[in-house]
C-alpha cells in the first residue's frame, strides 16, 4: 500500500514537471461525438428491448439458478422450550437438546424442502396430548419461525400452550445456499437415470431422423421425381401440430387397444419406442429443411468435375455430396437433439414408466411441489441443451462462409430408376405423415374406440371434458395472435437496433447475446423460471402472473432467437448506407424505418409472425406451468384430456390446432403473395 | 503548393485530424483546406484512409481527435443530420421500394415542403441529370449509370453546401464511367457546389479534380493540381502511384547531378544533397530519341539498344538496355510517328535523351 502511494506521488510530481517544462508533443483532446436525435431514439429502443429481455429471460433464469442452490433444513438450536408439569416452569431447554435426549432425528432427517414442517411434540418422549403438562416455546433469536396452525411467530416472546394445543406447533426450515440439492439428486438413481434415458432417446432419434430427412431432402434436391411441391408441403406438416399428437396417433395404432398392436409383439409402445417414433415424426421437418438448404447450395461444377474425372456414383456421393452437406447435417443433428431432449408433451403422453428429464421437472414441480428439485433438474437439462446450441452456432457460422462462394446451382438429370426409387421413398414418408394425422382425425370422430366405431361428434364436446373446453381453443387463438403481433414488433425493432445503431457496441453485444440465448433454454426451464421470478410477491411484475399476458411474454421469449435471426438476415441484405443517406438528407430514422426498411423487409416480417403464431398454437412446455383456470390453452387441454383418459377428445383438439395452423399458413401464403404483388413491385424488373 | 490564402478563409478546414480504430490508426494528423466551389479528389490505394477521411467529414464515422470546420462552423462532433452535405455511394443506396421521383423527393419532404414545389424541384433535378422521363420507374428498372445519376440528383435535392462522392463510378463499366465522369464534372461546375470525391482511379482524379489529395497509409502525401501531381510529384510514392514511371536506384553526386550506374545525369533540381542515395525517376513519355539529323540535342544523352518493342495502339512502348545503367530496362513511350520515321525496331541501337527538367531524384529515407 505505501509503495503504491509513493509511486502515485512520483508520477504526479513528474507530471507537473513535464507540464512546466512544456516541449511535450501536444496531445489533442478526444472528440466526443454529439449524439443526434436519432442516436438517442435508437439507444432508448435498445435499452427498452434489452430491458425486456433482461426481465423476461435473464432475471427469471437467475431466479431459477439460485433456487436450485437453495437448501432448507430445520435449525433446532433456534428454539427454546420450557415445560410445566404442575410444578412451575422448568429450566429452559433448547429444542436441539430435546431432540438429542429423545434421539428422534438424525442430522440428515432435518434436511427438507421450503415447504417442510417439523412437529415439536414428535421430539418429546412420552408425549400425550391428554397430559396436563403445559408448554411454552420461543424463538431463541429473532427471525426464527414456528407456526401455530398457520399463524407464524417470529418474535422472541414466550408462547404458552396446553398439551393439546402444542400438537399443532410446527417448526419452519431455515434457508441456506449450497450443493445439497444436487447431491441429493445424484444420490437418487430414480432421478439421475433420467439423464441417461434422455440422452438415449435424443441420440437414437437424432440418427434416425437425420437419415430419413437426408434421404428425403436428397430426393427433393437431386432427383427429377414428380410432385416435389406436394411432398415438401406434406413433410412440413408436423410443424403444425403439438409434439404430443404423434404420441396419440401411436396410442391408437400400437397402444393397448391399437389397430396394429400385434405388430409390437412383446414390446410396449408406452416407453422409449413410442417416444423415439413420435420424436422422429415431429423433428423430421426441422431436419429436412436444414439439410435441404445445405444440399441446394452445393456447386454443380464439382459434380461435373467428378463426372469428367470418371468417378463412380457412390464415390461422387461420398466425396462431393456428403462433404458439401456436412455442416447442414451437423447443424440438423444438433437441432433435432435439442428438440428431443427438451420436449415434454410427447414423453408425457407415451413415455409410460420411462422417465426423461423434461417430464421429471413437471413431476417434481406439479406432482411433488418440490420446486428446488425441479430447479435442479432444469439445470441438469440446461447443460446438454446449451452444449448442442453452442456447437450448432459454431457450425452455422462456417456454413455462412460456405454460402458466400459463388457456385452454380446443380440441375439433376432424369434417371428413371433413381427417380422411381426416390419417388417411392418420398411417397412412403409422405404416407406415414398423412397416415399419422389421418388416424388422429379418424379416432376423433369415432364414438367409442374400439367398441363402437360409428361416427359422431361427441368428442368435440370439449366443454364436458377436463382442460378448459372450447374456451381453451379460443384462448390459444388469442394467444397466437397476440404473440404474432407483439412478438413481431419487438423482435423486428430489436433486430433493427442491433444491426443499424451506431456505436454503443457493448450495449448491442449484450443485446445480441440475450437474443441468442432463448434457443438454448428448454421451454420447461423457462416456464419454471417464470414461476420463480414472477410468482414472487416482491416482484413489481407480479401482477401479470396467472394472466394471458405472462403467457404471451413467455412464448415470445421462448421463440425469440429464430425470429431474431430471420429479421437480422433480412436487414443484413439491405444496403448499409441507407441510414447514412437518410441522415445526410436530414430525415429522422423513423421515416426511413417506416418508408423503406419495413416495406422492404415485409416478407421476412410475415415469416416471423407466422412462425410465432404456429408455435404459440402448438407449444406446451413453458406454458404448462403458467396457465390459470381462465387461461387454459388448446395444447395444454390436449395434455390434460389425455391425462384424464379422454384420448379421443385430445386427438380432436390436436386436429383443431392442425386445421387452424394450416389455415394460418394458407392465409400467410396468400397474404405474402398479395403484398408481394402490391408493395414489392420494385422487385420485378 | 495548394495554398488558398488568396481566397480568404477556406470553406472546409481540416486540422490535425486523427482517426483510430482500436489500436490501428487509420488517419494520422491530417490537415487540409478546401476552397468554396472546388472539386477535390482523395486519391490513393485501398486502405490508405481516403474513405475514412470522407466519412469523418460526413460525420458517419466521427474522428478521434482534431477539428473540422465547414463554412466557419466547427462540425467536429456533430452527427450527420446536423451537418450540411449530400452524399453518393458506390452502391448508389437508392431505396428499392420507392420510385425514382420519390427517391429524389425523400429529402425534400419536410414539414412545410409544398407538394407542387417538391414536384417542380424533382422534375428540375431529373432534367439536370438528364433523365426526365424515368421518374416513375423503380431503381431496379434502371441501368447502373442511370441509378448513379438518380443518387446524385437525390444528394443534390436539398442544395447542400458540400457534395461527397464515395467511389461513385467504381461499380460501372468503363464506357459508362468515362461518360459519367465528364457529366459529373460539368454538373459540378454548373452548380458550383464544393465537391469531394474519393477514388482509387488516377485517371478519374486527373480528369475531374481541381486539386488532388494523394493519400497513403493514413497520411497526405501531396496536395496539388493534376498537373502538379503528375509533373512534380512530391514523394516517390506519388511519382509511382500516379502514371507510369521509371524508377532507377541512384545517388546525388552534386547539387544538380545524379548518377545511375556509371552514368551521370544533369537534373532540374539544384537542391540535391551531395552523396545521398535514392531513386531517380523519369516518365516513359519524357524520354526522347536523339538523332544528329533531327537536330534534337540533349545534355543527358545515352546510347541504348531496344530490347523489346510493344505496340499499344496510340504509341509504342520500348524497353531500352544499357549495361552502364544497370540490369533493369528503361521504359520509354515513343509516338507512332517517331517509330516509323526513324524505323525503330527491336535490336536497333539508338541514342536517347533524358531531359533534365523531367528527371527527379528522391532520397531514400534513412
Image (spheres, grey):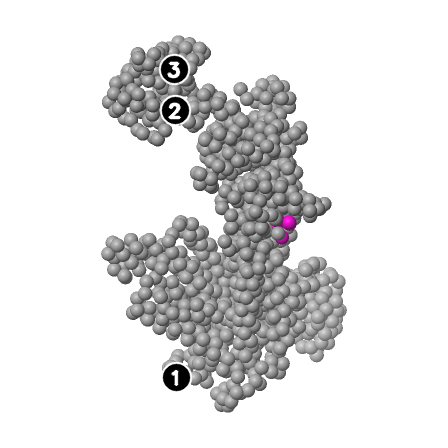
Residue pointed to by mark 2 = B245
Circle 3 crowding by C-alpha within 10 Å: few under 14, some 14–19, many from 20 = many
Q: Residue at x 39, y 9 (%)?
A: B254
Q: Are marks 3 and 2 on the same chain?
A: yes
Q: Position of residue A275 (x, y in %)?
A: 45, 72
In this rendering, the label closer to the viewer, 3 or 2: 3
Find the distance from the CA under tag 1 to the CA under tag 3. Answer: 105 Å
SS under mark 2? loop
Residue A655 x/y as whole percent:
53, 76
What's the chain of the residue with tag 2? B
Please say if A604 is above or below B172.
below
Q: Which residues are magenta?
A: A590-594
Q: Earlier in the sequence, mark 3 or mark 2?
A: 2
Q: Chain of mark 3?
A: B
| Residue tagged 1 | A262
Residue drawn 52% across the image and 87% down it: A455
Checking the image for residue B355, the label placed there is: 3
Q: Position of residue A360 (x, y in %)?
A: 52, 69
The residue lying toward the viewer, choosing from B109 and A5, is B109
Q: Residue at x 43, y 84 (%)?
A: A259
| Residue A83, quarter of the rendered image | bottom right
Tag shown at residue A399: none
Q: Is residue A429 rendered magenta in the image?
A: no
Measured Cα–Cα span from mark 3 to mark 2: 14 Å
Quadrant location, the C terminus of chain B? top left
Amino acid at each position: 500500500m505505501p509503495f503504491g502511494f509513493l509511486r502515485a506521488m512520483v508520477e504526479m510530481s513528474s507530471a507537473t514537471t513535464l507540464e512546466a517544462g512544456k516541449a511535450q508533443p501536444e496531445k489533442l483532446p478526444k472528440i466526443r461525438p454529439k449524439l443526434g436525435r436519432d442516436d438517442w431514439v435508437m439507444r432508448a429502443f435498445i435499452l427498452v428491448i434489452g430491458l425486456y429481455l433482461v426481465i423476461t429471460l435473464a432475471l427469471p433464469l437467475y431466479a431459477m439458478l439460485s433456487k436450485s442452490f437453495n437448501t432448507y433444513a430445520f435449525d433446532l438450536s433456534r428454539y427454546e422450550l420450557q415445560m410445566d408439569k404442575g410444578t412451575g416452569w422448568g429450566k429452559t431447554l433448547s429444542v436441539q437438546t430435546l431432540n438429542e435426549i429423545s434421539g428422534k432425528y438424525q442430522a440428515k432427517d432435518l434436511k427438507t424442502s421450503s415447504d417442510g414442517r417439523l412437529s415439536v411434540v414428535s421430539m418429546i418422549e412420552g408425549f400425550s396430548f391428554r397430559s396436563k403438562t403445559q408448554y411454552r416455546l420461543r424463538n431463541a433469536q429473532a427471525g426464527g419461525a414456528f407456526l401455530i396452525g398457520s399463524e407464524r411467530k417470529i418474535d422472541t416472546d414466550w408462547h404458552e400452550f396446553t398439551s393439546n394445543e402444542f400438537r399443532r406447533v410446527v417448526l419452519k426450515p431455515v434457508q441456506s445456499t449450497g450443493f445439497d440439492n444436487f447431491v441429493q439428486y445424484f444420490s437418487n438413481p430414480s432421478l439421475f437415470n433420467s439423464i441417461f434415458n434422455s440422452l438415449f432417446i435424443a441420440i437414437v432419434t437424432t440418427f434416425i431422423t437425420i437419415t430419413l430427412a437426408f434421404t428425403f431432402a436428397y430426393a427433393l434436391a437431386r432427383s427429377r421425381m414428380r410432385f416435389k411441391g406436394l411432398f415438401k408441403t406434406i413433410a412440413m406438416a408436423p410443424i403444425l401440430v403439438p409434439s404430443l399428437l404423434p404420441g396419440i396417433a401411436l396410442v391408437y395404432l400400437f397402444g393397448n387397444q391399437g389397430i396394429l398392436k400385434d405388430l409390437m409383439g412383446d414390446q410396449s409402445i408406452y416407453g422409449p419406442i413410442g417416444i423415439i417414433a413420435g420424436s422422429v415424426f415431429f423433428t423430421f421437418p426441422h431436419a429436412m429443411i436444414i439439410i435441404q438448404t445445405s444440399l441446394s447450395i452445393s456447386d454443380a461444377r464439382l459434380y461435373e468435375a467428378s463426372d469428367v474425372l470418371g468417378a463412380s456414383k457412390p464415390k461422387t456421393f461420398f466425396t462431393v455430396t456428403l462433404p458439401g452437406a456436412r455442416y447442414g447435417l451437423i447443424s440438423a443433428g444438433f437441432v433435432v437433439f435439442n428438440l428431443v431432449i427438451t420436449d415434454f408433451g410427447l414423453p408425457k403422453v407415451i413415455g409410460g414408466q420411462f422417465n426423461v428429464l423434461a417430464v421429471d421437472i413437471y413431476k417434481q414441480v406439479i406432482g411433488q411441489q418440490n420446486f428446488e428439485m425441479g430447479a435442479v433438474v432444469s439445470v441438469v437439462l440446461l447443460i446438454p441443451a446449451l452444449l448442442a446450441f453452442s456447437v450448432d452456432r459454431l457450425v452455422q457460422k462456417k456454413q455462412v462462409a460456405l454460402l458466400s462462394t459463388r457456385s452454380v446451382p446443380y440441375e439433376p438429370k432424369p434417371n428413371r430408376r433413381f427417380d422411381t426409387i426416390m419417388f417411392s421413398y418420398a411417397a412412403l414418408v409422405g404416407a406415414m405423415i398423412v397416415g399419422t394425422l389421418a388416424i388422429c382425425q379418424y379416432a376423433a370422430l369415432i364414438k367409442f374406440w374400439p367398441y363402437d366405431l360409428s361416427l359422431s361428434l361427441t368428442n368435440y364436446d370439449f366443454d364436458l371434458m377436463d382442460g378448459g373446453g372450447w374456451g381453451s381453443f379460443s384462448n390459444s387463438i388469442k394467444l397466437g395472435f397476440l404473440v404474432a403481433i407483439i412478438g413481431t414488433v419487438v423482435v423486428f425493432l430489436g433486430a433493427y437496433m442491433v444491426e443499424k445503431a451506431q456505436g454503443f457496441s457493448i450495449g448491442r453485444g449484450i443485446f445480441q447475446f440475450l437474443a441468442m440465448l432463448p434457443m438454448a433454454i428448454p421451454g420447461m426451464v423457462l416456464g419454471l423460471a417464470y414461476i420463480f421470478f414472477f410468482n414472487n410477491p416482491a416482484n413489481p411484475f407480479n401482477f401479470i402472473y396467472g394472466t394471458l399476458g405472462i403467457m404471451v411474454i413467455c412464448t415470445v421469449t421462448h421463440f425469440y432467437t429464430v425470429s431474431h435471426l430471420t429479421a437480422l438476415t433480412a436487414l443484413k441484405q439491405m444496403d448499409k448506407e441507407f441510414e447514412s443517406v437518410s441522415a445526410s438528407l436530414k430525415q429522422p430514422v423513423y421515416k426511413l424505418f417506416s418508408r423503406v426498411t419495413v416495406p422492404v423487409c415485409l416478407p421476412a416480417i410475415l415469416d416471423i409472425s407466422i412462425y410465432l403464431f404456429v408455435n404459440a398454437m402448438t407449444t406446451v412446455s413453458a406454458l404448462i406451468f403458467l396457465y390459470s383456470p381462465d387461461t387454459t390453452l388448446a395444447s395444454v387441454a390436449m395434455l390434460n384430456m389425455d391425462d384424464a383418459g379422454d384420448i379421443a377428445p385430445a386427438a380432436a383438439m390436436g386436429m383443431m390446432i392442425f386445421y387452424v395452423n394450416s389455415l394460418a399458413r394458407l392465409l400467410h401464403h396468400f397474404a405474402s403473395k398479395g403484398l408481394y404483388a402490391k408493395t414489392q413491385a420494385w422487385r420485378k424488373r | 503548393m495548394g495554398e488558398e490564402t488568396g481566397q480568404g478563409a477556406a470553406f472546409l478546414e481540416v486540422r490535425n485530424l486523427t482517426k483510430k480504430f482500436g489500436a490501428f490508426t487509420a488517419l494520422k494528423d491530417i490537415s487540409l483546406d478546401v476552397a468554396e466551389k472546388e472539386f477535390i479528389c482523395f486519391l490513393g490505394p485501398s486502405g490508405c484512409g481516403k474513405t475514412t477521411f470522407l466519412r469523418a467529414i460526413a460525420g458517419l464515422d466521427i474522428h478521434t481527435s482534431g477539428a473540422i470546420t465547414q463554412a466557419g462552423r466547427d462540425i467536429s462532433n456533430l452527427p450527420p443530420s446536423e451537418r450540411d452535405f449530400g452524399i453518393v455511394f458506390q452502391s448508389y443506396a437508392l431505396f428499392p421500394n420507392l420510385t425514382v421521383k420519390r427517391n429524389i423527393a425523400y429529402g425534400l419532404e419536410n414539414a412545410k415542403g409544398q407538394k407542387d414545389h417538391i414536384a417542380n424541384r424533382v422534375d428540375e433535378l431529373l432534367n439536370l441529370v438528364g433523365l426526365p422521363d424515368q421518374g416513375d420507374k423503380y431503381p431496379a428498372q434502371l441501368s447502373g449509370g442511370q441509378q448513379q445519376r438518380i443518387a446524385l440528383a437525390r444528394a443534390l435535392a436539398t442544395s447542400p453546401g458540400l457534395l461527397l462522392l464515395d467511389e461513385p463510378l467504381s461499380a460501372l463499366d468503363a464506357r459508362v464511367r468515362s461518360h459519367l465522369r465528364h457529366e459529373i464534372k460539368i454538373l459540378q461546375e454548373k452548380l458550383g457546389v464544393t465537391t469531394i470525391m474519393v477514388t482509387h482511379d488516377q485517371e478519374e482524379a486527373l480528369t475531374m479534380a481541381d486539386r488532388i489529395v494523394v493519400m497513403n497509409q493514413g497520411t497526405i502525401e501531396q496536395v496539388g493540381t493534376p498537373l502538379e501531381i503528375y509533373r512534380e510529384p512530391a514523394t516517390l510514392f506519388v511519382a509511382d502511384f500516379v502514371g507510369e514511371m521509371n524508377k532507377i536506384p541512384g545517388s546525388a553526386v552534386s547539387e544538380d547531378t545524379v548518377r545511375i550506374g556509371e552514368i551521370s545525369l544533369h537534373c532540374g533540381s539544384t537542391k540535391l544533397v551531395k552523396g545521398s542515395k535514392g531513386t531517380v525517376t523519369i516518365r516513359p513519355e519524357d524520354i526522347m530519341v536523339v538523332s544528329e539529323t533531327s537536330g534534337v540535342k540533349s545534355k543527358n544523352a545515352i546510347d541504348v539498344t531496344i530490347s523489346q518493342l510493344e505496340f499499344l495502339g496510340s504509341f509504342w512502348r520500348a524497353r531500352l538496355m544499357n549495361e552502364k545503367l544497370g540490369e533493369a530496362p528503361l521504359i520509354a513511350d515513343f509516338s507512332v510517328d517517331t517509330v516509323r520515321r526513324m524505323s525503330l525496331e527491336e535490336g536497333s541501337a539508338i541514342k536517347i535523351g533524358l531531359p533534365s527538367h523531367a528527371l527527379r531524384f528522391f532520397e531514400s529515407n534513412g
